[in-house]
Image (cartoon, rainbow, N blue to C red):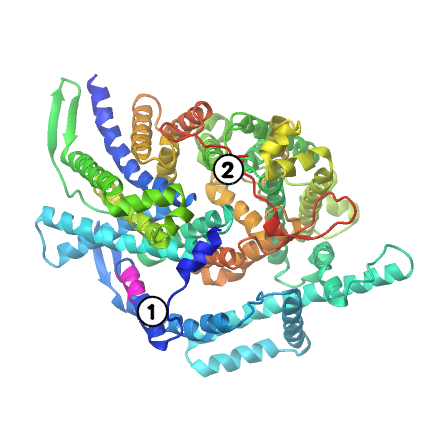
Amino acid sequence: MDYFLQQLINGITLGSIYGLIAIGYTMVYGIIGMINFAHGDIFMVGAFMALILFLLLISIGITAIPVVLLLVLLLGMFFTAIWGWTLERIAYRPLRTSFRLAPLITAIGMSIVLQNFVQLAQGARVKPLPPVITGGYTLMQTETFSVTLSNIQIVIIITTVALMTIFSYIITNTSLGRAQRACEQDRLMASLVGVNVDRVISLTFVIGASLAAVAGLMYLLYYGVIDFFIGFVAGIKAFTAAVLGGIGSLPGAMLGGLIIGLIEVFWAGYFTTQYKDVAAFSILAIVLIFLPSGLLGKPEIEKV
Amino acid sequence: MAEAVGTAIGTRVGQDSLANSVRDAIIAGLIAFLLFVVILGLKTENAQEKLILIPRIGYAVTIAVVVAVGRLLLDVFVWRARASRAAAKPLLTTRSILWLLAISWAIGAYFFIVPGAREALATSASDLFGADEWRTRTRIAVDLFGYAFMGVFIVATAMVLMLVLRRTLAGIGIGTRDETQGVLSELSTQLAPALLAIALVLPFLVVGPQQRYAIDTAIQVLTYIMLGWGLNVVVGLAGLLDLGYVAFYAVGAYSFALISTTFGWSFWVCLPLAGMFAAAWGIMLGFPVLRLRGDYLAIVTLAFGEIIRIVLLNWYSLTNGPNGISRIPRVSFFGLSFDRNAEPSFYSVFGLEYDNIYRIVFMYYVILFLALLVNFVTNRLRRLPIGRAWEALREDEIACRSLGINTVITKLSAFAIGAMFGGFAGSFFATRQGFISPESFTFHESALVLAIVVLGGLGSQLGIVIAAVALIGSSEFFRDLEEYRMLIFGGSMVAIMIWKPRGLVSSRTPSVALKERKVISAELVKEGHG
C-alpha cells in the first residue's frame, strides 16, 4: 500500500508534465489536423530557456527563489512562445493548403533543425542543475518504507492544475477560445464570419509552446539534468498521451498524460524499468484497437 | 476553397510601399533577435560540476541584422518582382531545367577539360580574403561546387548518350519512338535510363584514392533507395502512413545476423529467410491496426518501431543488448570467400592480388541488383490485381469496399511486401557492416526513409532515387562541415518541401490505362487515409 501510494504520487507528477506537452499536440491537431512533430523539441528549447534564464537571474543577483522561479516561468514562456510562433510561420503556414504529409515532413525537418541547433549553440554535454526546491512531507512511515511528497512534486501538480484551469477558462469563456473552437470545426466558415484564421492558428502555436515551456521548466526542476535530446522521448510520450486520450480533445490530453505517466511509473515500480516504454506503447495499441478514436475522442464521421 | 481563404487572408494592403518593406524587415530582425538572444546569446558551459554562463550577444545581433537585411532584399527584389509579374509562370519548367543542365554541363566541362582550373580558382579566391582559414573554406566551397557540376555533367552526358542510343536503335528497327515529341521533351524522359546506365558503370567511373569512399557512399545511397522503394509500396501505393518502417529493417538485419551466425548459412540462403521473417512481422503489425486510420495508424506504427528497438536493446540472451551482434559473415562471391586466408578464395580462383576493393565493388552490385529487383517487382505488382487494389484503396476506401475488394487482404499484403523489401535491405545492411546494434534502428531512420519517399513524390519510383541521392548524397557532401551537417540536412528537408509540396517529381504515370498512358499531375493523385 505504501509503495503503491508513493508510485501514485510519482506517476501523477510525471503525468502532469506529459499532459502539459500533450495539450500542444492535441490543440494543433484539432485546429489544423497535423502532427506537430517538432513540439517535443519546442519543449526541449523551453527546458534550455528555463536553465539559461535561471542561471542569468541568479548571476545578476536575484536570490529569492520564488521570485526567480516566477520570472523564469514568465520569461521562459515568452521566449519559447516566439519559437513556437516562428515554427508555424516558417514551416507550416506555407503548406497550410497542401496535402497531409507535406507539413509532417517539414515538422520532422524542423525537429532535426531544432535539436542540432541547440546542440551547436549549447554543446552536446548534459546540463546539470542542483536541486532548487528541496524538502517535502512524509505522509506515511513504516519501518521499511516511507511515503514522501516532495515540495517540487507539489509545485508541479499545483502549477499544472492552475494552468489547466486558466487554459480551460480561455478556451470556453473568451473570444479567443470561441474563435479557436470555430476554426476547429470549420476553418472556411470561421473566416467568413470574420475570424482571422491565421492569427488564431498562430496563437494556438503560441499557447502550445508556452505550455511546453512550463513543462520544460518542471522537467528541469524535477530531474535536474537536461540535454538536447530530451525532446524526442518526451515528445513521443506526450503524443502517445494525446492520441490515447483522443486527439483533438483537451481533457483527453490531460487524461492521456496522466495514464501514460502512471503506466510508466507503475510498470517500472512493479516489473522492470527497461520495458516501461513498451508497456506504455502496448496500452496505446490495445486501447486504439478497441476504441479507435481514443478515450475521449469524437468518432470520425465518414462522408461518402 | 481553403486556398481562396488562404490568399484572401494572406494579402496585405499597400504591399508596394518601401516603408512597409522596411517596417517588415525591422520586425523580422527584432523577432530573430528575440529568438536567438537567450538560446544562442548565452552559452552554458560545464565547469567543475557547475554551470557558468558565457555571454555572446554578438551572435544574436549578427543573426538579427542578417535576417532583417535579407528580408528587405528579398522583399524588394524577389517577392515584389514576382507579385508584379502578371502571369505567374512556374519557376522550373522542363525547358528551364534543361537550360540549367546545359549551363552546369558547360561549367563542369570547363573544370573537366582545363587542368588545374579548380585549384586556380581556389587559390585566387582565397587570396582575396587573405586569412588562412578562408583559404580552406573557399577550397571546400569550390570543391563542393566542382563535384556538383561534375555530377550534373555526368548525368547530362549520359542523358544525351541514351537519347542517341535510343534513336539509333529505333533507326535500325529495335524499339519505337514517338515522332511527335520534340527533342527537349524526349531528352527529359531519358533521366531514368541515364541514371541506370551511370549506376551500372559507377565503380569504374571513380578511380584513385577516393574510390573506396565513393563506392561506399553509393552503396549507402542505394540502400536508402531500396528502403524508399519498399516504403513506397505501403505509403505511396496503398496510402497507409507508416512511421515505424525501421522495425522491418531491424527485423531483417537481426534475423539475418542470428541465422547466419547460428547456422552458418550463406548470404543467399539467409536473405530470403530474413525477408520472410520481416514479411511475417509486417502481417503481425498489420493485423491489429487494420481498423485504424490516418494519424492513429501513424502513431501505432511509430510505437511498434520503438517497441522493436527497446526489445532488441533489452533481450540480452538473444540480441546481446546494446553491444549488438558482431562477426556477421561477409558476403561471398557465390561461395568463394573474399577473405585473404580462405581456400579457395575469390582471389586464388581468379588469380588476383588480395585487395579489399573487389569485395566492395561486388557488394555494390549486390545492392544494385537487390534494389533493381525491388523496383521491377513493384512495377509488375502495380499492374496485377493486388497492386491495382492498393492504389484503389489509396484513392477511395469506401468505393473499394463497395466494389468487393477485400481491404483486409489488400492492406496486409501491402504491409507484408513493404516489410519484406525492408527485410532485404536490413540483411544487406547486416552483412555489409558485419556488426549491428539497436543504435542503427532509431526513429530517425524511419523519418529519413519517409522523408525520401515524400520528398521524391509519393508513388514515384524515379522521385525516390532523386530524393535519396539529394538527401544522403548531400549529407555526405557536407561532411567537411561536420557539426553543421545535420542542421543543413533538416533545413533542406523543410526547404524542399515548401518549394515542392508534392515532391520533386511532380507527375505520375498511371499503372494501367485503357488506350494511351497519359502522364498526369501529382496533384490528381490522392494520398489515402489509412
The percent position of residue A193, horizontal first and vertical second, equals: 35, 50
The percent position of residue B359, horizontal first and vertical second, equals: 68, 48
Q: In the image, which is nearer the foreground, mark 2 or mark 1?
A: 1
Give the mark nearer the N terminus: 2 vs 1.
Answer: 1
Tell me, yes or no, if residue A232 can be seen here.
no
- The boundaries of the magenta stretch are B30-37
Residue marked by disc 1 = B24
Q: Does the magenta stretch include residue A155?
A: no
Residue marked by disc 2 = B244
- Seen at 66% across and 75% down, the residue is B106
Q: Distance between the residues labelled 2 and 1?
A: 42 Å
The answer to whether residue B184 is above or below residue A58 is: below
Is label 2 in a helix, a strand or a loop? loop
> Is residue A265 left or right of B445 when viewed as pictured?
left
In the image, A247 versus B426, the foreground residue is A247
The percent position of residue A89, horizontal first and vertical second, equals: 38, 57
Q: Which amino acid does label 1 sit on?
A: Asp
- Seen at 55% across and 54% down, the residue is B472
Which quadrant would residue B130 be assigned to in this image?
bottom left
Query: Do tags 2 and 1 sit on the same chain?
Result: yes
Question: Which labelled disc corresponds to residue B137?
Answer: none
Q: In which quarter of the image is the C terminus of chain B?
A: top right
Q: Which amino acid does label 2 sit on?
A: Gly
In the image, B521 versus B290, the foreground residue is B521
Magenta stretch, main secondary structure class:
helix
Q: Which chain hosts label 1?
A: B
In the image, A133 versus B507, the foreground residue is B507
Q: Does the magenta stretch include residue B36?
A: yes
